[in-house]
Image (cartoon, coloured by chain):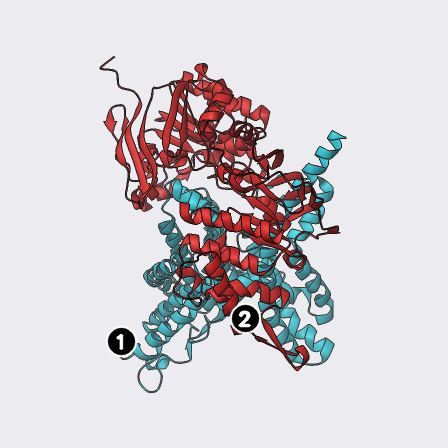
Chain colours: A cyan, B red
């Protein structure tokens, strides 16, 4: 999808560095931190592969709204909540293992679609401010989620098992154990190569998802989304239903985020009912940006590079921080600081690039004038 | 001939925007394979007429139009451009309507892509069909061939030179099989000479294939080269409808500008032969739609210099660039000192003032009172209307002085308002314009740029604004540079008039010169 025209080689190196400055910066940080932390390569590899299996699907759900020009969609949190609601039901019905995961995914679809449509409609009413709006929507929906899970489950909605209910008789406990589901997807067909565990089934699902995204870009709907993403007015003049296309992109993203959350939680093995989704949007978006994506452009490659770099950072920072300063808290602080920082930097760079493109016009004018003066002389 | 039905017929078409008549009594016919050249000054009604023909929604929103538009003898009722497209009317607009990150092929077939069905799309609907890239390429290449200009179908629009973008749009219209009538709105404006020739050639090709073309341009020679007939519009009516072989450029110019007999009763003084107060050298300004290229211009002290020209040729770019509102380069010397560009504050500090054409956006604080609007810049820039306490440490607004000066200008300019504390947004357009002028006058500048001071205001207000400017110039000796699209009003008050064409100064003439010579300058370098 990245068709880049060839530029003169001298220029292309600097422009390559400029466009990929965020990933390059992180590669450098990680390269410095690895020897300081003192972790063995085997340990790091194991960690990275586990975290890739856990997170990639969630981050993939961000790609389609970016394609449709809706920026980094914090609305994915809504999908994550849908996945959690589905998991609560499935664990209450005591359906475990792969059937449980599949059922949870199926259950999450209608909830995700509903929330996606709501989110899409609101975002259509606030075009150009999708990021901040979706961020606030995620807080607002968190309230609805709490209402449902904390008050209605067990009182209005029947919950059978006391093990997940709060002692007062309604509402769900702080944590829902998913021990019987823990890593059942990851362990299916799992391989162990030189002590590194590879969750083959999860990776197959991720690979299929990537293929689906590649295929989707070639469909009429995908083409329409790209058109809408680049210029809504032109797309509208060509007869594309802009609003509907945008809603569909958000719905797809929400549904995928729901699946992603279920994959994430089956790997973790338990679910923090009220906080599992709260940071997930932020971390996924930070990871995608670390991988070199921008507000208006993201590829599958960005997802994988981003997951590797961001999570290496997560693993290394506390230890490296502790080694350097003797204080573990510094590392903890460092990684939160980094993820917010990355998002800020990426947003600023996006605006700067736009302004640079604008200033370029003036420079072209000046150059044209100089040439003219020379040809006159 | 009685049973012959022309492809397009317009009968008594008229249109008003809320009582403001912009088109009246328009009658014209067009046959298949004919090329019609439509010319006229800005505001003559060309665009409105084409909007009616193309079914643009803003026509319905403003109350529709009178009269009949008939295609093949059938009366048309368009509610949106899609209806027009379905009837075989295509239009290439002045602004590009292309997706920047798509290739030419993707743009040509935007939302009309050939598709392949798959199992998934059978289940989930047509939008999940995959695009048939191969037949897309064939179709697009077919349309490009029809056009006669070769463009690379695989090239991304944002990498294309501007002319190729224009051709991509034309190819898009040509790729529509039902196309019967194509409207080209100033298509050659962005083309190089060579490209324009190719376009004219391809227009001839379209006509030979039976497509009727309406060609709008300011380059009159092109009209004569390619059109079968010329329709000249002025002030909302068709003043001439002739075969192009029976006319010539100077005749068309005269019809366009009109007023062959100059009612030149204005008292013109002899242009002052004073020193140059501002000299502009090699100025470029990057103002979208009003690009200025390589402008050299000298302004004499105490004169009123007019800058005229057609819309989009760069006349607005000159003051906006010098005053630092758009990025600019070159040298500007004022009163012996060089003025740094891209720095509005320095301009204001050197006693330059600017009345912007964008009075609601740049000119006024809409939610504030007249007093504030008039006194604010003077207070900010020159510390006027301030009372100093504690040796200047604390500055308070001198409300009385502000009220006095506001009252003075309200009287002088006859600003219609309920009180000097009325909010600026509650005033009519003409009165808002007067407030903008008062604001600039209150700065007591040495040099004043006034951009389109009479745009969108009624005749009475117009005369007042022009008189106020003239008086300000004569009594205070302030040098005024006035930018306007209306040649007649420039000729009323200016000493000399510079005509901008294609972003450059095409020539400077005394205001007493004939309309024709100004008209010739206006179209001389149109790009």
The residue that label 2 is drawn on is B401
Q: Residue furthest right?
A: A377
**Residue A89 x/y as whole percent:** 33, 71
Q: Residue furthest bottom?
A: A168
- Asked whether residue A202 appears in the rendered view, the answer is no
Residue B111 vs A316, above or below: the answer is above
Q: Name the outermost residue toward the left.
A: B3
Q: Point out the image quarter for the C terminus of chain B.
A: top right
Identify the residue at horizontal 46%, vertical 60% (top origin): B411
Q: Is residue B448 visible?
A: yes
In the drawing, does residue B123 fall left or right of residue B104? left
Local secondary structure at mark 2: helix
Q: Is residue B219 left or right of residue B382?
A: left
Place of residue A359 in the rendered image (x, y in percent of width and height, measured from the top left): 63, 49
- Left or right side of A359 for B45: left
Nearer-the-camera pick, B37 or B381: B381
Q: Quadrant of the N terminus of chain B?
A: top left
Residue drawn at (34%, 19%) of the image: B31
Residue occupied by mark 1: A158
């Amino acid at each position: 999808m990245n068709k880049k025209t060839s530029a003169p080689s001298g220029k292309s190196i600097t422009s390559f560095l400029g466009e990929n400055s965020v990933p390059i910066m992180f590669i450098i940080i990680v390269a410095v931190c690895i020897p300081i932390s003192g972790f063995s390569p085997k340990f790091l590899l194991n960690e990275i592969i586990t975290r890739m299996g856990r997170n990639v699907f969630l981050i993939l759900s961000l790609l389609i709204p970016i394609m449709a020009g809706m920026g980094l969609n914090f609305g994915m949190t809504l999908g994550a909540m849908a996945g959690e609601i589905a998991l609560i039901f499935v664990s209450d019905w005591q359906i475990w293992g792969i059937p449980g995961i599949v059922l949870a995914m199926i259950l999450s679809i209608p909830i995700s679609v509903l929330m996606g449509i709501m989110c899409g409609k609101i975002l259509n009413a606030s075009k150009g401010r999708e990021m901040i709006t979706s961020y606030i929507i995620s807080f607002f929906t968190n309230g609805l989620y709490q209402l449902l899970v904390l008050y209605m489950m067990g009182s209005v909605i029947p919950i059978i098992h006391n093990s997940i209910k709060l002692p007062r008789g309604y509402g769900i406990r702080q944590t829902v154990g998913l021990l019987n589901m823990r890593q059942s997807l990851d362990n299916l067909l799992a391989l162990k190569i030189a002590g590194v565990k590879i969750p083959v089934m999860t990776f197959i699902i991720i690979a299929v998802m990537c293929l689906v995204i590649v295929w989707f870009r070639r469909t009429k709907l995908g083409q329409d989304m790209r058109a809408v993403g680049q210029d809504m007015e032109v797309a509208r003049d060509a007869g594309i239903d802009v609003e509907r296309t945008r809603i569909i992109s958000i719905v797809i993203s929400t549904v995928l985020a729901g699946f992603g959350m279920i994959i994430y939680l089956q790997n973790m093995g338990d679910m923090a009912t009220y906080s599992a989704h709260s940071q997930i949007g932020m971390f996924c978006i930070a990871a995608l940006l670390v991988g070199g994506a921008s507000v208006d452009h993201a590829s599958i490659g960005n997802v994988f590079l981003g997951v590797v770099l961001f999570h290496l950072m997560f693993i290394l920072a506390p230890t490296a921080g502790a080694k350097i300063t003797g204080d573990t808290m510094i590392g903890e602080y460092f990684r939160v600081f980094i993820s917010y920082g990355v998002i800020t930097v990426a947003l600023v760079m996006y605006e700067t690039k736009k302004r640079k493109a604008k200033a370029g016009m003036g420079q072209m004018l000046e150059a044209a004038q100089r040439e003219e003066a020379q040809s006159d002389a | 001939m009685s049973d012959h039905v022309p492809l397009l017929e317009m009968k008594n078409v008229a249109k008003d925007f809320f009582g403001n008549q912009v088109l009246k009594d328009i009658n014209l016919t067009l046959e298949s394979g004919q090329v019609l050249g439509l010319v006229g000054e800005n505001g003559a009604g060309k665009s409105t007429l084409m909007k009616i023909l193309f079914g643009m929604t803003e026509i319905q929103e403003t109350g529709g139009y009178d009269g009949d538009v008939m295609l093949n003898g059938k009366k048309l009722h368009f509610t949106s451009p899609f209806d027009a497209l379905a009837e075989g009317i295509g239009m290439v607009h002045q602004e590009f309507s292309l997706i920047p990150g798509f290739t030419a092929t993707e743009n040509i077939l935007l939302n009309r892509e050939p598709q392949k069905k798959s199992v998934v799309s059978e289940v989930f609907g047509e939008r999940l069909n995959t695009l048939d890239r191969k037949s897309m390429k064939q179709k697009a290449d077919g349309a490009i061939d029809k056009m006669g200009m070769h463009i690379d179908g695989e090239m991304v629009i944002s990498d294309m030179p501007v002319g190729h973008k224009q051709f991509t749009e034309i190819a898009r219209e040509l790729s529509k099989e039902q196309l019967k009538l194509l409207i080209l709105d100033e298509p050659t404006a962005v083309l190089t000479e060579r490209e324009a020739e190719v376009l004219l050639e391809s227009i001839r090709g379209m006509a030979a294939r039976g497509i009727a073309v309406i060609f709008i341009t300011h380059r009159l020679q092109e009209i004569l080269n390619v059109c079968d007939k010329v329709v000249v519009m002025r002030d909302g009516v068709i003043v001439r409808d002739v075969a192009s072989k029976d006319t010539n450029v100077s005749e068309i110019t005269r019809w366009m500008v009109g007023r062959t007999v100059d009612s030149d009763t204005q008292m013109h003084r002899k242009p002052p032969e004073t020193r140059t107060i501002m000299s502009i050298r090699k100025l470029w300004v990057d103002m979208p739609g009003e690009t200025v290229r390589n402008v050299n211009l000298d302004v004499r002290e105490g004169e009123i210099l007019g800058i005229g020209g057609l819309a989009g040729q760069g006349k607005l770019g000159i003051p906006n660039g010098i005053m630092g509102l758009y990025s600019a380069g070159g040298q500007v010397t004022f009163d012996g000192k060089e003025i740094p560009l891209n720095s509005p504050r320095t301009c204001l500090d050197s006693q330059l003032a600017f009345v912007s054409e964008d009075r609601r956006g740049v000119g006024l604080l809409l939610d504030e009172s007249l007093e504030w609007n008039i006194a604010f810049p003077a207070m900010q820039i020159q510390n006027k209307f301030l009372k100093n306490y504690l040796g200047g440490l604390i500055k308070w607004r001198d409300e009385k002085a502000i009220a006095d000066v506001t009252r003075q200008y309200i009287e002088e300019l006859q600003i219609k308002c309920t009180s000097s504390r009325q909010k600026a947004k509650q005033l009519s357009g003409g009165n808002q314009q007067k407030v903008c002028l008062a604001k600039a006058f209150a700065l007591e500048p040495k040099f004043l740029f006034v951009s389109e001071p009479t745009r969108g205001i009624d005749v009475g207000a117009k005369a007042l604004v022009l008189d106020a400017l003239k008086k300000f110039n004569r009594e205070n000796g302030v040098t005024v540079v006035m930018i306007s699209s209306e040649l007649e009003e420039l000729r009323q008050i200016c000493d000399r008039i510079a005509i901008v064409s294609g972003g450059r100064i095409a020539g400077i003439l005394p205001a007493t010169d004939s309309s024709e010579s100004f008209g010739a300058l206006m179209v001389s370098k149109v790009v």
